[in-house]
Amino acid sequence: MQKREIRFEYDVCKSIDELNESDQSLLESAREVTKKAYAPYSEFLVGAVALLENGATVSGTNQENASYPVGICAERVLLASAAMIHTNVPIKTMAIAYHNLNGDSNFPVSPCGMCRQSIHEYEDRTNHPIRLILSGMTGEVMIIEKASLLLPMSFGSSELRSVK
C-alpha cells in the first residue's frame, strides 16, 4: 500500500484593505450584491461577482425556493449567466461574499460541493483557472489561485470519455 497526500496553499488577508484595488472592487461588489439574494428560509445571503477575460463582470445571488433545498447557489447562477451572456469567455476571478442574517458574517466560507464541481467544470471547459476571493461582510479574506484546488480527485468529462 502506498500513502499519498493532497494539499494546497492559499493566501489570507486580515481585511479587504490588504487587497489590490481591482480585487477590493470585485469583493465590494460581491458584498453589495448579497442584498439581491432571495433567501427567506436560510436567511444566508450569498453574492458572487466575476471578472471575465473580456473585462466584463457578471454577478449572481442565491435563490431559494419554498421547496427548500431546491434553490440555486450564487456561484451557479453566476456561471449560468456568464455562459449565456459571454459564451466561452473565461472567468479570471470570482469574488464570493455572504451575509448571515442570523449570525456572524466576519470570516470566509467556501463554495458548497455542487458549486465546486460546477466551477471546476467551467475552468475545464474554458481551459482557464478561476481565482477565488472568499469573504464575509467583514474580516479575513481568502484568496485561492484556482478553484479546482477545492475539489481534488474530481470527477469530470475525461472520466466520462474513458468509460466504455
Image (cartoon, helix red, strand yellow):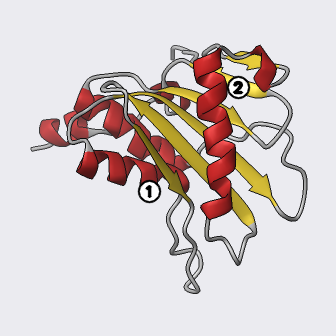
Q: For mark 2, does the 10 Å Cα neighbourhood hold few (<14), some (14 to 19), or many (20 or more) residues?
A: many
Whichever of callouts 2 and 1 sits on the residue coming sooner in the sequence is: 1
Residue at 33% of width from left, 38% of height from top?
121
The numbered dot on residue 77 is 1
Coordinates of residue 119 in the picture (x, y in percent): 42, 39
Residue at 61% of width from left, 63% of height from top?
36
Residue at 60% of width from left, 15% of height from top?
8
Secondary structure type for disc 2: strand
In the rendered structure, which amino acid carries the disc numbered 2? Answer: Met
Can you name the residue that lies furthest to the right here? Answer: 103
Residue 35: name its quadrant.
bottom right
In the rendered structure, which amino acid carries the disc numbered 1? Answer: Val
Q: Give whichever of 161, 45 is nearer the camera.
A: 45
Q: Give whichever of 35, 47 is nearer the camera.
A: 35
Coordinates of residue 63 in the picture (x, y in percent): 54, 68
Q: In which quarter of the image is the C terminus?
A: top left
Residue 139 appears left or right of 125: right
Disc 2 target residue:
142
Q: Is residue 63 above or below residue 146?
A: below
Can you name the residue that lies furthest to the bottom here? Answer: 66
Residue 88 appears left or right of 60: left
